[in-house]
Image (cartoon, rainbow, N blue to C red):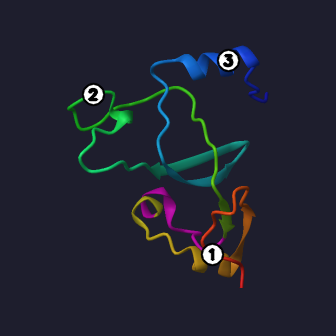
Amino acid sequence: MRHQPTEAALAHIALDPHVRHVPAWLYVQNVGDGTVSFIGSSRVRADEDHPLRYGSNRSHQFLVGELLVRPHYALDTNVLRGQGLGGLATAHHDLSRFLSDGEILLDPHGLCPVTKR
């Protein structure tokens, strides 16, 4: 089953007051059987309330919905094998190191700050 949003669904997303557009990074890890796990982060200016908190003052929120991803660039690598999602969440993003055993999968807007050596 492949999720393909209809034109009506995309129009609804554009008009939905709960949809948030925020900068983000994600690590995506293949776990087999058509499943991937991911972990990531998003940051806005320190003096702003983050839009993904939906005005909450509690420490955590559990969100169920859809993830809209518009990649600026994507790299793949085997350098991170064995780190697990917790290790990835706290790791430094050494993009040059990633490319030592990986490649640039896409860079549609020419924004990737590194090149394959």
Query: On the rendered image, what quadrant is the C terminus found in?
Result: bottom right
Quarter residue 111 falls in? bottom right
Is 56 on the left-hand or right-hand side of 100? left
Residue 48 sits above or below residue 30 on the image: above
Is 108 on the left-hand or right-hand side of 57? right
Q: Earlier in the sequence, mark 3 or mark 1?
A: 3
- Percent of width and height locating residue 38: 55, 48
Q: Earlier in the sequence, mark 1 or mark 2?
A: 2
Going by the numbered disc 2, the residue's amino acid type is: Gly
Counting other residues with Cα less than 10 Å from the Cα at mark 1, is it few (<14), some (14-19), or many (20 or more)? few
Q: Assess whether residue 49 is covered by the magenta stretch.
A: no
- Percent of width and height locating residue 116: 72, 79
Counting other residues with Cα less than 10 Å from the Cα at mark 3, is it few (<14), some (14-19), or many (20 or more)? few
Magenta span covers which residues?
78-87
Report the residue at 63% width, 66% height from top.
112
Task: Identify the mark at residue 114; answer none if there is no mark.
Answer: 1
Q: What is the magenta segment's predominant secondary structure?
A: loop
Residue 54 sits above or below residue 93 on the image: above
User: Which residue is label 2 attached to?
Assistant: 55
Q: Nearer the viewer, residue 57 or 85?
A: 57
Q: Nearer the viewer, residue 43 or 31?
A: 43
Is 66 on the left-hand or right-hand side of 74? left
Q: Nearer the viewer, residue 69 or 34?
A: 69
Q: Earlier in the sequence, mark 2 or mark 3?
A: 3
Quarter residue 59 falls in? top left
Seen from this angle, which residue lies furthest right? 1
Report the residue at 50% width, 61% height from top.
84
The reply to whether the C-beta atoms of the residues labelled 3 and 1 are less than 8 Å apart is no
Cα distance in 3D space between marks 1 and 2: 37 Å
User: Which residue is label 3 attached to?
Assistant: 9
Going by the numbered disc 3, the residue's amino acid type is: Ala
